[in-house]
Amino acid sequence: MKLLHIDSSVLGSHSVSRQVSAAVVDRLRQANPGLEIIYRDLGSTPLSHLSGSHLAAAQGAAAQAEVAQDLVAGQAALEEFLAADIVVLGAPMYNFTIPSQLKAWIDRIVVGGKTFKYGPQGAEGLAGNKRVIIAISRGGFYGTGTPAAVGEHLETYLRWVFGFIGVTNPEFILADGIQVGPEHREKALAGALRAATDLHAA
Ligand SMILES: Cc1cc2nc3c(=O)[nH]c(=O)nc-3n(C[C@H](O)[C@H](O)[C@H](O)COP(=O)(O)O)c2cc1C
């Protein structure tokens, strides 16, 4: 069984989502020692943003050298994703949504004919054969009924985009209110780490 572990925080060892995604992977590794784990750090090794040259090359145009290299990296990211049985994703909220590094990765895995296709009924996801677990960390509070709920475009976006490619039940572990103060940060982190430890591992 293959697990793809992805982090996207730019805050290195200070990152909450990195600690929680690592705890999720530990939990799954302990339950399944034979797990093959692939790690991708989008903070330290980002993919480029898609450009017209990328899209032209995908249509068969000759690629410039720097784009050619990045196309290979993007193809590798797609193949890793397609091959994974489990995906564990660390996803911090930056300006109400995902980090741009994570968006660049999503742009490489949401690919027509690979992870979705259009048919008579509209879009159909092709990547529904995966368990996706997402560790979210947010500075504030965005729960239903809170004033900021309408500004939440991280969890809602990820739920939608994974649903679009067929992953209809992504699992979320939340660490909220990280910027409220040190005490609350510790409490939210401890709660998220507990949730990671309690995760069903089958
Ligand atoms: C560039 C930047 C933008 C942020 N934007 C938001 C935001 O829009 N809303 C929010 O609640 N917290 C925001 N935060 C706080 C982070 O979501 C919070 O610190 C979280 O723990 C980040 O996850 P990480 O620790 O894994 O990097 C922002 C933090 C940074 C560094």
Image: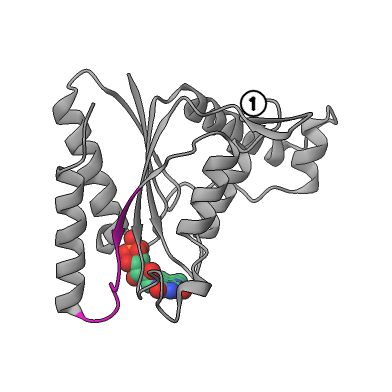
List the residue tagged with mark 1.
114
Amino acid under disc 1? Lys
Q: Residue at x 43, y 40 (%)?
A: 169
Q: Position of residue 57 (x, y in %)?
A: 79, 33
Query: Which corner quadrant of the image does residue 116 belong to?
Result: top right
Splitting the image into 4 quarters, where does residue 91 fall? bottom left
Main secondary structure along the magenta-highlighted residues: loop
Residue at the image point whose x is 20% and y is 66% from the top = 188
182 vs 161, left or right, is left
Give residue 22's quadrant in the image.
top left
Front one among 200 and 55: 200
**Coloring basis for residues:** one colour
Q: Is residue 134 magenta?
A: no
Residue beneath the point at 35% across and 74% down: 141
The boundaries of the magenta stretch are 172-181
Q: Where's residue 126, x and y in %?
A: 59, 26
Residue beneath the point at 45% across and 57% down: 155
Left or right placement of residue 165 versus residue 172 in this view: right
Q: For the N terminus, give its image quadrant.
A: top left
140, above or below 115, in the image: below
Task: Count how many numbered circles sit on residues in the image.
Answer: 1
Percent position of residue 2, x then y: 35, 22
Q: Which one is in front, 151 or 102?
A: 151
Relative to 77, is 194 above or below? below
Is 177 inside the magenta-drawn segment?
yes
Question: Does residue 193 appear left or right of residue 12 in this picture?
Answer: left
Residue 122, given in percent of the width and then of the height, sits at 74, 36
Q: Quadrant of ligand 1?
A: bottom left
Q: Secondary structure at mark 1?
A: loop
